[in-house]
Amino acid sequence: MARAIELPVPEHYEPRRAEEWEYRPDEQRVLEAAEEWRRRQGIEAAASDRQRVLLLLVDVQRDFCLPQGTLFVGGRGGRGAVEDSDRIARFIYRNLGRISEVTCTLDTHYPFQIFFPSFWVDADGRTPAAHREVTAEDVRSGRLAPNPALAAWAAGGDYDWLLRQVEFYCRELERAGKYKLYLWPPHCLLGGEGHDLVGVVQEARLFHGFARGAPARIEIKGDNPLTENYSVLAPEVLMRHDGRPLAQRNERFLETLLAADAVLIAGQAASHCVKSSLEDLLAQIQARDPSLARKVYILEDCMSSVAVPDPSRPGSFLFDFTPQSAAALRHFAAAGMHVVRSAEPMASWPGMDG
């Protein structure tokens, strides 16, 4: 059986690395350190765990987790994701013998997607600024329209189809009531440094995988140009305006989560991708067996909310999604999920075996 007690944080871990864009762990050294740590601490293979504990880390990527990133999640305090990354790494190290598997999602984008300014033009043919919402009325009125150059590959050359599709998409988002279409700065572009996992989390997940013989899986999301994909389990809109499928749910990964004895969730951002992933997971749980919500543990101090500072008014925000995050946590807790903190011993968490 895996060790139930908390372990010390290994000597190689340096907290200051959590705020360094350039930090990349040396994989060979991580392997050697993990093997030595396994022998020293008597750590057994994850396959022997009596309780299968899956840690899901949502989008802990450089563009979200470091101030140099194009979409740094600083929260209201300005350092949110940096401090979250440090807490996540420490949590993995201390609970190496309790966590059976660490799975990370990767927000994965291309230069032209419906939630990027590059996808759109205004009435004068100019690219709009980031950090604004797009409504169905914006499309109907012509204030914003898809960039005509994209129709060749996004709509088989049929610009009218693309125009109908984006209006339908905005209308579907507004009907669902979760989000309006929001234009984000380009981020997590496949092939770019911002797409990579932040260094201290990459180091910790590799250390865990090497020490426990665990697969350290990755789930890709967000590469469909015509829909947002905040949740790892499903895109925001599944159908096209003509009734054909636009995208699919990630049923395979859903079953992986539901098969675990405990699912621990952290990452970025609490107001968007973490929140949406939890909402989709909860909806599936309630459709099957509401008591399954008790197997989900939300690490509230290992995630931050999107809060976009207003450069013209210090201390104010253009958009602040912190209240939505707080309301979501209350909703999840009321449904039976556990809201916990990373410094608390896992053995003290309700329903977690000692």
Image (cartoon, grey):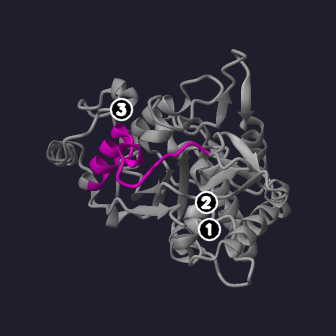
In the picture provided, is 140 more to the left or to the right than 27? right
Query: Helix or strand or loop: what does disc 2 sit on?
Result: loop
Q: Which mark is residue 231?
A: 2
Q: Amino acid at mark 1?
A: Ala
- State which region is magenta: 184-209
Give the residue at the far front of this rendering: 124
Asked whether, in this view, residue 248 is left or right of residue 328, the answer is: left
- Say what amino acid the circle numbered 2 marks: Ser
The residue located at (48%, 56%) in the rendering is 109
Name the one closer to the observer, 46 or 15.
15
Q: Are marks 2 and 3 in contact (CB under 8 Å)?
A: no
Q: Which residue is mark 1?
A: 234
Could you say where residue 173 lies in the image, as x and y percent from the top left? 77, 61
Q: Residue at x 61, y 50 (%)?
A: 274
User: As rendered, which of 205 and 334 lies closer to the eye?
Assistant: 205
Asked if residue 290 shows in the view, the reply is no
**Circle 3 residue:** 21
Q: Quadrant of residue 248?
A: bottom right
- Marks 3/1: CA–CA distance: 30 Å
Most foreground residue, 129 or 278: 129
